[in-house]
Amino acid sequence: MALLAGLLALLGWFAFTASAESVDNLRGDIPTGDEVRAELDAIADRRVELVGDLVAAERSIAVIFEAREQLDSTQRRLTAEIEASTESLRLVGIRAFMSGGPVGELEFLSDVGDASELSWRNHLIRNHASSFTVAVQRLRFVRSQADDSVLENIDRAGELRHEIDMLTLSLDELGPVEEEARRLVPLAEAWDRAAVSIAEGSYGIAPADKWKALRLCESTHNYEAISPSGLYRGAYQFDIATWYAVGGVGDPIQAPPEEQDARARELYARRGDQPWPVCGRYLK
């Protein structure tokens, strides 16, 4: 009897292990609820950090602008011209980079239709290069006329503007990441519930091909299917009460397929094929 009990316990352990592995395979890349919540906490912490850094940078640049108010009119004029010229040259550099950098001119010349077009493009390139050279020379001259403290002020303001741009960009990039994490919350929690139900319930988990046959019978695989009466909804034709009983929120047809799959498996693990009195035969 002790040997029989041990064998039954071992078989039960193997059955649980197989079910757990099957659940993991079914949920695919969907994380656990704990993992999603940890990700959301990390995003919130990162947002607080970025906002703090952004506020500090904006305060620092405000101090720089206040210091400029103490400059005489000549140094204020030089400051304005230096910053305007530097920004113009930066934009020219960006455009050159976007068009291919130094080789961009060669590509520009090679893509020509006839001799007259080549002549025109040569003219544009010469003028552009000449204008760029003049602008650089003017910037160097103006910087030479400014006090060292003014140049430090300008350079530090430039660094802070870049830092503010990067911090703002990082904050903007957090939005889609957080949105995706929040989208995964109901999916993760649904599969967490399904895993527990399969481990604790009386019916385990049915093979994937049987679920496919059930969906075909219930809804022709349509996750937005609605019965003629309007009472039964989704790929597995949940009624609202049953949907809520397995953790669903709102209308089943508005839930993504992965969530409907998970909640159907929880329902089966606890009640078998009884919730599908006609099509449930495909789960046997």
Image: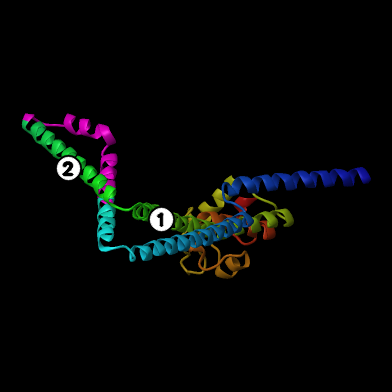
Going by the image, does 200 lie left or right of 189?
right
Image: magenta residue range: 87-115
- Which label number is shown at residue 131? 2
Q: Residue 189 magenta-drawn?
A: no
Q: Which residue is mark 1?
A: 160
Question: Picture coordinates of residue 137 (x, y %)?
Answer: 22, 42
Categorize mark 1 by other alpha carbons within 10 Å: few (<14), some (14-19), many (20+).
many
Residue at image location 91% in from the left, 42% down from the top: 3
Whether label 1 touches label 2, CB < 8 Å: no
State which quadrant residue 156 falls in: bottom left
Q: Main secondary structure of the magenta part?
A: helix
Which of 104/37 is in front? 104
Residue at image location 93% in from the left, 46% down from the top: 2
Categorize mark 2 by other alpha carbons within 10 Å: few (<14), some (14-19), many (20+).
few
Secondary structure under tag 2 reads helix
Q: Earlier in the sequence, mark 1 or mark 2?
A: 2
Question: Picture coordinates of residue 121 (x, y %)?
Answer: 12, 35
State which quadrant residue 62 falls in: bottom left
